[in-house]
Amino acid sequence: QVQLVESGGGVVQAGGSLRLSCVASGNIFAIARVAWYRQAPGKQRESVARITSGGPTVYADSVKGRFSISRDNAKNTVYLQMNSLKPEDTAVYYCNEDIVTMTARKEYWGQGTQVTVSS
């Protein structure tokens, strides 16, 4: 059983920073892709940033230059460093990963962590 657990959300003033973490646990053989999504109230879930094994790191235009995604393969952990936060960054942030186990490759989601940016 694979599980993703996010942490690091909270309330921050505009211009501040937060670092989100997502730890994957379970019978993991490899993690092929890691990504962060977010969903604001009344809006669709949107991609924020992703890293594909052997491929480029991709950011949404709205976060380029402010957010940075990184991964620690030894710890099965992916991070999202968020700087210069804006009120429009307020959303629930979700970790999303393509994980390979001994039997299958599947997409997994975390439970989400709330980020609130006050003006």
Image: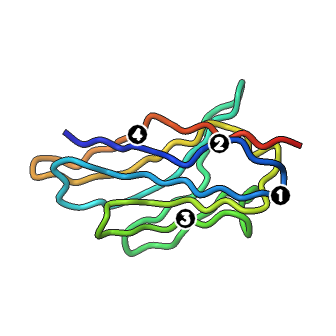
Per the model, the C-alpha gap separating discs 3 and 4 is 16 Å
Residue 81: x %, y % from top left: 61, 62
**Dot in front, 3 or 2:** 2
Q: Seen from this angle, which residue lies furthest right?
A: 119
Per the model, the C-alpha gap separating discs 3 and 1 is 18 Å
> For this view, does 29 lie left or right of residue 56?
left
Q: Amino acid at mark 4?
A: Trp
Mark 3 touches mark 2? (CB < 8 Å):
no
Residue 1: x %, y % from top left: 19, 39
Per the model, the C-alpha gap separating discs 4 and 1 is 28 Å
Residue drawn at point x = 31 percent, y = 64 percent: 75
Q: Which mark is residue 54?
A: none
Residue drawn at point x = 49 percent, y = 68 percent: 70
Quadrant housing the C terminus: top right
Instruction: Answer with mark 1 or mark 2, whichever residue precedes in sequence.
Output: 2
Please tell me whether mark 1 sits on a helix, a strand or a loop: loop
Crowd band around label 4 with a 10 angstrom C-alpha radius: few (<14), some (14–19), many (20+): some
Per the model, the C-alpha gap separating discs 1 and 2 is 14 Å
The residue labelled by disc 1 is 15
> For this view, does 112 lie left or right of residue 45?
left
Q: Amino acid at mark 3?
A: Ile
Q: Which mark is residue 109?
A: 4
**Dot in front, 4 or 1:** 1
Instruction: Answer with mark 3 or mark 2, whichever residue precedes in sequence.
Output: 2
Which image quarter: residue 109? top left
Crowd band around label 3 with a 10 angstrom C-alpha radius: few (<14), some (14–19), many (20+): many
The residue labelled by disc 2 is 10
The residue labelled by disc 3 is 69
Instruction: Answer with mark 4 or mark 2, whichever residue precedes in sequence.
Output: 2
